[in-house]
Amino acid sequence: MVTALGIRRESKALGYAMSSVSAKELTKTANSNFGAALYGKAPGVRIGTTPGGATSAVNITIRGINTITGKSQPLIVVDGVPIRDGEVQNNNYWGDQRLRGNGLLDINPEDIENISILKGASAAALYGSEAVNGVVLITTKSGKGSKGFSVDLSTSYSVDNVAYLPRYQNVRGAGAPLNVSNGGQDEAGFIYYDTDGDGTKETRGILGYSINFGPKFDGQPTMSWDGKIRPYNAQENNYAALFQQGQNSSTTVAMTNSTDNSNIRLSLTHQGNQGVSLGAENTRNIANLNSTFKLGKNYSTDVVINYINQSTTNRPYSIDRLMNNFTGMMGRFDNGEWYLDKYKTSKGYRYVTGTNQSLTPDENIIYNGMRGDITDYIWRVKEYNEVELSNRVIANMTHNWQIFESLKLRGRIATDLTSRKTTSKQSSEIPQIFGYSGGFSLENYLNTIAYGDVMLIYTKKVTPDVEINAIAGYTGTKETSTTVSRGTSGGLSTENLFDISASVNTPTGGNYRLMLVKDAYIGTLNASYKSFLFLEGTIRRDRTSTMNPNNNSFVYPSVNSSFIFTEAFKLPSYFSYGKVRASWGIVGNYPDPYLANVAYSQSTLGVQEVGGLPVLYTTIPVDFGNESIRPEEKHEIELGLETKFFVNRLGFEISYYNAQIRDQILP
């Protein structure tokens, strides 16, 4: 099995809990979302996804929540290299209503050989201050194990449907009895409109209440909120029209060539995804190269390159207000299809209610029952268009030098580079004679991760029964990120002219930059006796730039052991395998960048006198750093039992662990 730092070990030698998921398990359901494909595949691992399909973020939780304010996602490692992933933050309804993805979604399930999940502190201790939430190790497919040249073609197609819609009674429509609320309804619960202007209210309708204790459905003609007279019947599955059937397709061509001196696998994948949210689409073109070259008797080089070109149109909007607010809850005499016809006027402007200004007053919505949050949701989904174009390269080169039979040197350099451009267009909502509206913005994002490590690996059989392995090494990472944005302010000077130059007021701008540097010295020592008793100890000394330079170094130790009692003792033949294990370890979670800084904000009062210079002043921000902050630490002990019976046909595994988070970082 692949363990920390890409080290392969036998499963029986592990003294901690670890799950492995094969490629077959990930691809047999043709899931376009890599994280969602992990559902139910590993005990103790919870997968949470937002309802958006291929582009929606994946939240992986291993053994519960370990932090309050810091990173909650496990560390993602691809072919031994930590990659950009990102936290799942889709609860900012008033700041950003679109459901954003994270870096984990760029991984193509078709290129994965297997996944190892390090759950406990001892399993993940070699990753130190990044591993409080566990580690997900991804190994991509290579040409190893095959001979000659071969071509594999795979294609898949799947559909996504909304699994659950709100379920209500279908006996009564919106409204309330007179003794509860008097809204002018008659005893049956109906109100009446004068639709022909003769002074007589002859057309019945219902109240615009959010509770459904109104008149019983009778199938008789009744005015609905969009001005159409329909049979008064319950509109079952009335939310369904707010969504569409998602469609996902994927085609992969993989070419493999294996010789005595090289193994090469090149795969090309095209994915097309249509989300369940109206207008949501995503296209990916992925190229993956995994190669090994033997350059000498004792020297080899591995080169792995993963390139993802992606276009995402209209990420799904949050549906919070549709289900979590009275003004977004449909009555039973209401239907999403009606909103699709009325969310904008015949001239293309946003819907208008009552007697408000409009170029088409006859189209104003004047009858009871419309849900403003739903109409607003449809307007945003249809008329707020956002396109993301991104390119990402994840690459690494690993050199292996077998110095002596028992001594090996491994060096690796890697990068994870992401470039993304986002264009947002908001259609003009009102005629320009009534005011300015609409908007346009651009955003450029660049994130780079440079990674390197060097490991000296020693393996020695001391006696016929005793073998020892030792590893000493160094690893370092530098991450930089910049975001620059520009947008219109005050609306568009010309209707639907999507350009920064169309800004009514001075365009707004924003920028953000981040730099993070971390490194570590690591060491492991393990020993085995007759291949049934194993003992391992690890240590890692971390440094990170997110804390005070005088207090930024911490040590993370671990120890684990396993005993294969079926190989040590003679047991009945039906007892195929039995192992007991125990481990203890410490892992951490360093503060987010700049959280420890005690910094001031600078502003200007401008020039205060003729011929003078601008007057500058500083203020203390609301968020005030803590220069003495320490990383969170997870101290964990774990005990386990693994058994298999009847020639491995039946298995049983149980784990007990006790974890404590110390020095919890609080807001």
Image: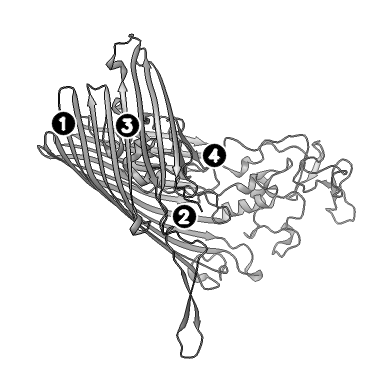
Q: Are marks 2 and 1 in contact (CB under 8 Å)?
A: no
Mark identifier at residue 560: 3
Q: Position of residue 40 (x, y in %)?
A: 46, 30
* Lower position in the chain sequence, tag 2 or tag 1: 2
Q: Position of residue 443 (x, y in %)?
A: 44, 61
Q: Is residue 103 visible?
A: yes
Q: Is residue 107 visible?
A: no
Q: Nearer the viewer, residue 266 or 646?
A: 646
Mark identifier at residue 387: 2
In this view, 553 is above or below 455: below
Spatial separation of the CA atoms under disc 2 and disc 1: 57 Å
* Lower position in the chain sequence, tag 4 or tag 1: 4
* Amino acid on which the number 4 mark rests in the picture: Gln
In this view, 498 is above or below 77: below
* Residue carrying label 4: 245
Q: Which numbered mark, 4 or 1, is in the foreground of this view?
A: 1
Spatial separation of the CA atoms under disc 3 and disc 4: 49 Å
* Residue carrying label 1: 460
- Element assignment for label 2: strand
* Amino acid on which the number 2 mark rests in the picture: Val
- Element assignment for label 3: strand
